[in-house]
Amino acid sequence: MGKKIAKEVSIAVADAVAQCRVDVISAYPITPMTHIVEHLAELVNNGELDAEYIAVESEHAALSACIGASAAGARTFTSTAAQGLMFMYEMLYIASGFRLPIVMVIANRALSSPISIWNDHGDVMTMRDAGWIQTFAENGQEAVDLIYHAYKVAEKAFLPVAVNLDGFIVTHVVEPVELLDQEQVDKYLPPLRMKYKLDPKKPITIGAIGVPEIYTEARKAQDEALKASYKIVVQAWREFEKISGRRYNPIETYRMDDAEVALVLIGSLAETAMNAVDVLREKGKKVGLVRIRLWRPFPMQDFLKAIGKVKALCVFDRALSPGATGGPVGIEVRSALYQSNKRPKVLNIIGGLGGRDVTAEDFMELFDRTYSFLKARPRFSYEIYGVKE
Amino acid sequence: MRPEFAKFKPVNLKELPKEDWIAPGHRGCQGCGTVLPLKLVLKVLGPNTIAVSSTGCMEIITSPFPFTSWRIPWIHVAFENAATVASGIESAIKALKRKGRISKREKIHVVVFAGDGATYDIGLQYVSGALERGHNIIYCCLDNEAYMNTGVQRSGATPFRAHTTTSPAGKVIPGNITWKKNLDGIVVAHGIPYFATASPGYLADFLNKVKKASLVEGPAFLHIYSPCPTGWGSKSEDTIILSKLVVDTRLFPLFEVIDGKYYILNRKVDKPKPVEEYIKLQRRFRHLKPEDIEYIQNRANEEYERLVKLCEIFAPPKAEKEAKVE
């Protein structure tokens, strides 16, 4: 097992990508993901990583080149954020429709306008329906581990995987991180074998027209593949636990055993929220935390199990869906609950937008409000939190 | 000049393979002058080729699932980015060859087929990126001078005064108001190893250029004239006549540029045919007034003469002069 070394998370993530022996990297710079691809370029140019680095002219081209390379049988990597993700949007659906095992790191960042380089989930929530497997890291160690996992899953499910790291909050933090040994990675991740690829010995046609007679069937097949990837995701985490000792689940819970009120969120804010939970628990409040690690396919059963018998949930969204019935996570949670017999009250809060800090005190206040929500129903379906009036 | 051309021998028409790598029975229109050059390109490149198509007629007519006309590996991703997809494929082949997962001896051509819209307009950035990075790809711009697949809309390649559905011959504005974009100049400015214009009307010249493109290491760009009877309102049987006339009227000179600096004129047109002969065969030009035709005639001559001068000034070094195409 490797040693714990203090590293900037972006550098550690790039090292993990290199350990996965990628064949082709194609990327276009955007804050806050740049350190990842800069380090990969360094590794390639110093002869430490045997890969082709394509310094493309845009994000749309970055994913386009990955699609070509992946279709030709190469293990590929790209990374982006915010406007970059928006610019590659068209290709997101094609990558998943072609069932290509591309891995992308998204350093989550707010969308323009106003232009912001700071963290929220507005970017990735727009690709909710793009057919990618999507995971979210809470900290640097998890970010690194999700890279190994992403390739394992992508190449078994034949679906692209987006690993989400909160921009700056995770990407730029120096943290003690333990990488796997190269031998462990090689064992966990055997060389990519594509059953169908662009090979003159076995010609295939990729990207044919889906006439109305087959389009629905093709989409259904894609949906089934994404749903079926759940088992692959979980299995890959089990295997990972065996070699690393680190355990990951689709849904993470914190002090949920007898919780009455729980906070639901995604990403690095969970670390802050845990502090709030600890303080309130000391005061005798039965509060807990549910963190969604696997966002697509949405692990509905795990989620329903995780919330136990809570009376109320505070779903904290870091993305705004203007004019909708809630934030993306809020909508998802309410929809999941409606398909079950559980009927906890749901307070949907939108916050932490564009790098706005969310503190443990904020979460304590939100827990308070969730408690009062048990008595009186508010008149809004969601609220943007912490707005300066 | 390019050391790769030392190996060059002109294509022997009699030895061209009987096989086609694009199957008959596709859905192309009668007299389609786009699928014809596409087929010819593949005849020269052979089956060890991976083809990338941009969205357009050629993609539509060859791939309605569950049918495919492609006998070689083929991928279509989207409208604008065929050059970049090809970049990815070429990079993958490079990396996998180095790692021993593809045999190092195997020569695999990566060829792009993209229309004028996909090249002049929506894909210009992608083309430029791929050329600038120096990928070993053959980019074929099949130029039928408008967005034919969506119903004949104007592109940056549409000729002056041509009627299209978005540059209609109206009472106030009679057709397309701009001259065809100088894509050749843009491509040549990248200093790529090989650039050539080609027309299916001059078959030997065409095939030799495909062969040269296949020999160079690095990007090769073929700008291929591709008549579209449906979009141009020309007769199906006139496709080859037009493919010759466009050269003979100086509207589409046949030339090559090596390494972005050596110019070679492949077909001298000392006594050009009047552009009117070319124009009158196409309904898209039927509203043209004598002064329009005169303008086109003058500009064609002017641009041709400029090209002749370039070819004189920037001729390849004499000792190593190319084996003459044609």
Image (tube, coloured by chain):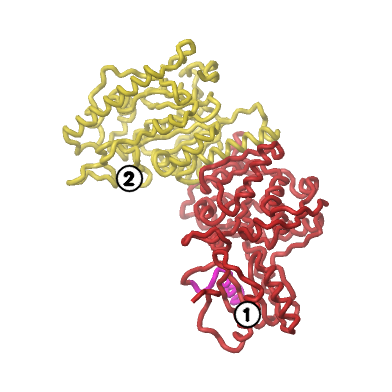
Chain letter of disc 2 in the image: B
What is the magenta range? A324-342
Category of crowding for the residue at label 2, using alpha-carbon neighbours closer than 10 angstroms: few (below 14), some (14–19), many (at least 20): some
Number of residues whose C-alpha sits closer than 10 Å to that of mark 1, classed few (under 14), some (14–19) or many (20 or more): few
- Magenta stretch: residue B87 in it? no
Residue linked to disc 1: A365
Amino acid carrying mark 1 in the image: Glu
Residues at marks 2 and 1 touching, judged by CB atoms closer than 8 Å: no
Check the image and report above or below for B240 versus A241.
above
Mark 2: amino acid: Gln
Residue under the image location 60 percent in, 89 percent down:
A375
Is A130 on the left-hand or right-hand side of B33?
Answer: right
Position in image of residue A255 (x %, y %): 74, 75
Q: Residue at x 33, y 27 (%)?
A: B252
Chain name for mark 1: A
Measuring from the top left, give residue A190's x and y in whole percent.
74, 45
| In the image: residue A53, left or right of residue A93 | right
Q: Colour of chain A?
A: red
Please, is residue B239 above or below residue A116 in the view?
above
Residue A327 visible from this viewpoint: yes
Residue B153 got which mark?
2
Question: CA–CA distance between discs 2 and 1?
Answer: 59 Å
